[in-house]
Amino acid sequence: MAEKVSVARCDTYEYRHIRAAVESLLEPLGGIGAFVAPGERVLLKPNMLAAKHPSAAVTTHPALVKVVSDLVREAGCQVLIGDSPGIGGFQRVAERSGIRQAAVESGATLTPFDTVVEVRGEGRFRSLEIAQAYWEVDKVINLPKLKTHEMMTLTCAVKNLFGVVVGAAKPAWHLKAGASRELFARLLLEIYLLKKPVLNIVDAVLAMEGNGPGNGDPLSMGLLIAGADAVAVDMVAARFAGVPADLLPVGLEASRMGLPGSCPEDVAIIGVQPEDFKNAPFKLPAGMDVQFGLPRFLKQGLRKHLMAHPHAIKDLCVLCGACREACPPGVITIENSALSIDNGRCIHCWCCRELCPHNAMGMRKGTLLKVAEALGKVGRKR
């Protein structure tokens, strides 16, 4: 049976308009009542990457959070809103992103992910520590933002659940699994499978292209995407973004694992169809490499020529140390009023760029990466 993914147009975050759009989006899926029941404790998991204004398109827009919170409360449920931000304290991110005000107005409870529970997995990762608040609620509704991602090409429903990994455990997992996109995609999918959200609603009204997920360019896309299966939702979102399936580590790994929703024939799109959506393909991150499909011996031999490497932009860098704290392998140092990066030990997870609050981490591209871009194979322009 095909997984249903609903797609609706929505070009504004004005409350009345986006509420009508969400209700229309969920109608073919059975409405909010098909996913939650009176008396349940329901956690909303938005993207709360960093303390940025909603106009930056870094976080899930508070208007969508409020609409979904209102609908779930009207269904007779208790609503919690939680995440573990990539940088900055939970309360500061909630305030700056507008999510705190959305919680206040809708009567939801802000719930920082600050305590963990160990959960036994059944895949490659046998033991995973995730947020206790996420694990103990009755239901989860996932509210990702559609953005490009320098490591995973796109971040959407599956990647958004990496937020249930708490605090310092994030760079630890990047170090353990982040040297391989395939392995990191497997980690993301196994986190998703531990406790699947009952519903995923993607904020693609204002999306992000370019050097996402923290420093890309806001892009008016005018869409909402929803479905019960996060993999199917991600694959549909990628089609609307114009991103080829072979550039999606999560989709490729999901297919290898035999997960539903990873193949186009597994998915029924309801509402707006990709062929009717005329936006140009997303501009992809400049830091992407061109190693997909290459034999291992070529990857190793040509690595420095196929990849981009991070470097500090001196005119923007204030030596705040955020990149150093975020770096999983600890290859960034600050000495004598200068920032230094050991590219030989860099795992190219791009956490430094993702979490730099000043957009001061640039990149130097390998020779073959420059050639590939010139040929139009990577980082396609809009």
Image (cartoon, rainbow, N blue to C red):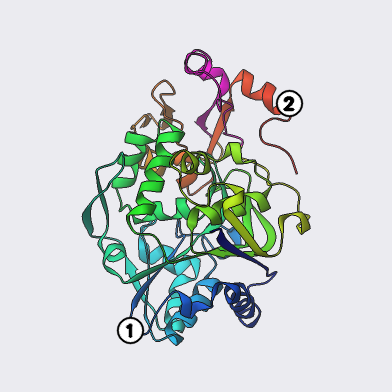
Query: Can I make out residue 87 in this image?
Result: no
Where is 96 relative to 87, above or below? below
Q: Amino acid at mark 2?
A: Ala
Q: Nearer the viewer, residue 312 or 106?
A: 106
Over which residues does the magenta segment extend? Answer: 286-313
Q: Nearer the viewer, residue 81 or 77?
A: 77
Kindly identify which numbered label has been placed on residue 374.
2
How crowded pointer 2 is (Cα within 10 Å; few <14, some 14-19, many 20+) is rated as few
Residue drawn at x 69%, y 21% is: 371
Kindly identify which numbered label has been placed on residue 39.
1
Which of discs 1 and 2 lies nearer the camera? The answer is: 1
Query: Can I make out residue 282 in this image?
Result: yes
Q: Secondary structure at mark 2?
A: helix
Residue drawn at x 56%, y 31% is: 363
Where is 277 relative to 380, above or below? below
Horizontal and vertical percent position of residue 287: 57, 34
